[in-house]
């Protein structure tokens, strides 16, 4: 991003003023997704700290760049993007309904800061750290990057003596965890403000707007979803952000595009194989580096980022030899073997029990000689953000700008081409040693390596 401002900032104007007035006192940077972004002084107080700059060392898509070379964007630019979209959303509401809704400067500033700081507690390698690594080294621990973001915000404020009142800080943190566990803070005054950054009510928020647009661009994919249409037509009715009825299919594209990204990028079979190798490397290095201890103190946590792999790779310590070897295998593309996958039929989804490595071992012939540690099994759920339910059932609509009533729309009133099933459950099997590759299930391997290619690879080794 390019800095187009003067080195000295003029005093910040009131954040609730018209956006064009506020821009005179803001720093201008250029984002490859949203164009010009204006950062006010309060935002810069957080951005220009070592703790926030750490986000530059966290790739937004973790290890996806090993499959999609362009996916090297970071949590830093994503956070600026969410800040900008949150600012745009709350200013639109203030412009058109500000007097009716009682939106004040205080509200505008808190929404913007919530967008900026929502990922400041994120761990390395996208969600791998909290979903794969921590559960294996600290079994039973309940830890989320959203909760860590709250601790990091307090630490940043204290460590850098940022002048911000406690009321603003409290509301910013509430907005960040508003969607945690799928529960919205419905008892809060001006609840619609809590739905802008992390929407626990129906999942439509500016965080998704930014990462869907940013991730598809970085991976060279097409994005048919236009978040601008929703930003321009949203309206608050009964303390809830609602959308014009004609935007039903636009919202459906939001959730279907997200599901497509999960299938083709976030859970790509080869990328997951590399993730499992990194997890194994981190676990083997944990006794020596005490990686899991970083989550105990924000003062240590802000120094943990994706470069931990380079730290392991560059070390000559004997205790890290196994971890180094795994990372070197990744560099040479000698990755865990993706064996096969099985998509659970929709009629079996409700009562399907997750498959384990032990299940795979027991299903093999007696001469297979496989151990549980030889096999990795992952049960992947891909849905439209509402499990097996239609996410649009939770979205409220209005007919036109002259109406003041909100309502829900049944899918069969819109199109008969919309899906009748809203979740996939995919069982995938990997082998840590490619020589032990076995086929599981009857489904033909989708992304398998041809026998000719595999023979050439093994002969070279």
Image (tube, rainbow, N blue to C red):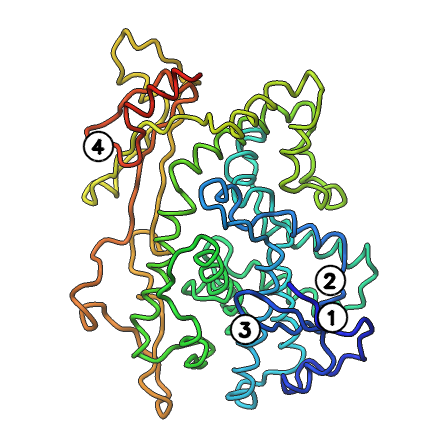
Q: Which mark is residue 444?
A: 4
Q: Nearer the viewer, residue 415 or 263?
A: 263
Of the two numbered discs 3 and 1 in the rendering, the one whose residue sits closer to the viewer: 1
Alpha-carbon span between mark 1 and mark 2: 7 Å
User: The N terminus is located in which quarter?
Assistant: bottom right
Q: Quadrant of residue 289?
A: top right
Where's residue 268, x and y in %? 39, 41
Question: Decide: marks 3, 1 in contact (CB < 8 A)?
Answer: no
Residue that appears at 62% across and 33% down: 309
Camera-nearest label, 1 or 4: 4
**Quadrant in the picture for residue 90:** bottom right
Quadrant housing the C terminus = top left
Query: Which numbered circle lies on residue 46?
Result: 2
Does label 3 or label 4 sit earlier along the sequence?
Answer: 3
How would you rate the neighbour count of disc 2 (Cα within 10 Å): few for under 14, some for 14-19, many for 20 or more? many
What's the distance in space between the residues labelled 2 and 4, CA to CA?
A: 51 Å
Earlier residue among tags 3 and 2: 2
Q: Which residue reaches farthest left? A: 416
Element on which disc 4 rests: loop
Residue that protrudes farthest toward the top in the picture: 367
Q: Which of pointers 3 and 1 lies earlier in the amino acid sequence?
A: 1
Q: Cα distance, mark 3 to mark 4?
A: 48 Å
Please tell me whether mark 2 sits on a helix, a strand or a loop.
helix
* Residue to which mark 3 is pinned: 193
In the rendering, at what x and y percent does residue 198 appear?
Answer: 51, 62
Query: Mark 1 — residue?
Result: 42
């Amino acid at each position: 991003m390019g800095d187009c401002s003067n080195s000295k900032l003029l005093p910040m104007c009131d954040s609730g003023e018209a956006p064009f007035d506020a821009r005179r006192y803001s720093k201008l940077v250029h984002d490859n997704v949203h164009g010009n972004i204006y950062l006010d002084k309060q935002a810069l107080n957080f951005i220009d700290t070592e703790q926030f700059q750490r986000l530059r060392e966290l790739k937004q898509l973790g290890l996806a760049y090993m499959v999609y070379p362009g996916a090297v964007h970071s949590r830093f630019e994503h956070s600026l993007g969410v800040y900008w979209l949150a600012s745009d959303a709350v200013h639109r509401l203030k412009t058109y309904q500000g007097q009716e809704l009682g939106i004040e400067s205080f509200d505008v500033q808190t929404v913007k800061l919530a967008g900026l700081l929502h990922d400041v507690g994120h761990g390395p390698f996208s969600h791998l750290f909290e979903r794969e690594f921590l559960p294996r080294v600290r079994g039973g621990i309940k830890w989320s990057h959203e909760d860590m973001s709250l601790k990091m915000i307090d630490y940043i404020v204290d460590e850098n003596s940022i002048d911000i009142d406690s009321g603003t800080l409290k509301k910013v943190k509430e907005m960040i965890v508003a969607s945690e566990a799928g529960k919205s803070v419905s008892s809060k005054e001006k609840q619609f403000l809590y739905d802008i950054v992390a929407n626990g009510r129906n999942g439509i928020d500016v965080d998704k707007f930014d990462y869907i647009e940013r991730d598809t661009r970085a991976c060279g994919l097409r994005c048919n979803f236009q978040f601008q249409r929703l930003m321009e037509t949203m309206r608050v009715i009964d303390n809830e952000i609602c959308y014009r009825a004609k935007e039903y299919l636009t919202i459906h594209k939001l959730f279907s595009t997200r599901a497509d990204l999960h299938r083709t990028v976030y859970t790509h079979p080869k990328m997951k194989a590399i993730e499992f190798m990194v997890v194994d490397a981190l676990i083997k290095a944990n006794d020596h580096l005490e990686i899991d201890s970083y989550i105990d103190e924000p003062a240590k946590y802000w120094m943990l980022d994706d470069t931990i792999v380079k730290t392991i790779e560059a070390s000559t310590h004997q205790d890290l030899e196994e971890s180094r070897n795994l990372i070197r295998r990744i560099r040479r593309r000698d990755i865990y073997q993706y064996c096969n996958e099985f998509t659970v039929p929709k009629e079996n989804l409700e009562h399907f029990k997750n498959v384990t490595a032990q299940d795979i071992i027991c299903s093999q012939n007696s001469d297979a000689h496989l151990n549980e540690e030889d096999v990795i099994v992952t049960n992947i759920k891909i849905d439209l953000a509402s499990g097996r339910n239609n996410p649009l059932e939770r979205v409220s609509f209005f007919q036109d700008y002259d109406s003041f009533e909100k309502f829900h729309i049944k899918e069969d009133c819109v199109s008969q081409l919309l899906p009748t099933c809203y979740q996939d459950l995919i069982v995938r099997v990997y082998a840590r040693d490619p020589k032990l590759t076995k086929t599981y299930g009857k489904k033909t391997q989708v992304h398998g390596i041809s026998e000719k290619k595999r023979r050439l690879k093994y002969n070279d080794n």
